[in-house]
Amino acid sequence: QVQLVESGGGLVQAGGSLRLSCAGSGSIVNVNAMGWYRQAPEKQRELVATITGGGRANYADSVKGRFTISGDIARHIVDLQMNSLKPEDTAVYYCHAYSARYGINYWGNGTLVTVSS
């Protein structure tokens, strides 16, 4: 059962931009925050950015000033604008949503971002 669907990944040259989008299905309920994580080859999954229902955003130090998260948590929509991309940003990017009421983490299947040097 697909609950979060990502789109917007692809291949881009260093210095370029991409925009990732994520939309949740109706089976997702009581979401308090949404965000993006990424996993590079042979590395652990790491947080990229999150946003709460109140609009508070949090970023990994490695992407501050380059990436911007936005969304409508009530509609289960979150986007990630990625500028000034670097080869080290290459990874599979996963959309995430969290329900504190039910203690549930929702994940998308991921979208691949490849940044060439």
Image: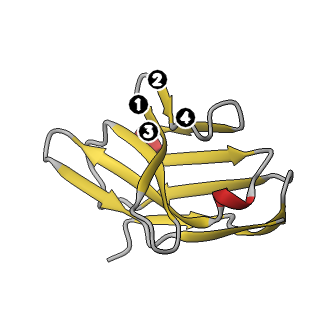
Between the residue at mark 1 and the residue at mark 4, the CA separation in whole angstroms equals: 18 Å
Quarter in which the C terminus is drawn: bottom right
Which residue is most to the bottom? 1
Residue at the location (53% across, 67% down)?
40
Which residue is most to the left? 102
Instruction: Determine which residue is flagged by label 4.
Output: 61
Residue at the location (86% across, 51% down)?
15
Kindly state the secondary structure of the residue where label 1 is placed.
strand
The reply to whether the C-beta atoms of the residues labelled 3 and 4 are less than 8 Å apart is no
Residue at the location (81% across, 52% down)?
17
The reply to whether the C-beta atoms of the residues labelled 3 and 1 are less than 8 Å apart is yes
Height in image: 93 above or below 1? above
Residue at the location (44% across, 73% down)?
109
Instruction: Determine which residue is flagged by label 3.
Output: 73
Left or right, residue 23 beside residue 19: left
The reply to whether the C-beta atoms of the residues labelled 2 and 3 are less than 8 Å apart is no
Q: Nearer the viewer, mark 3 or mark 4?
A: 4
Label 1 amino acid?
Thr
Q: Which mark is residue 56?
A: 2
Sequence order check, earlier mark of 1 and 4? 1
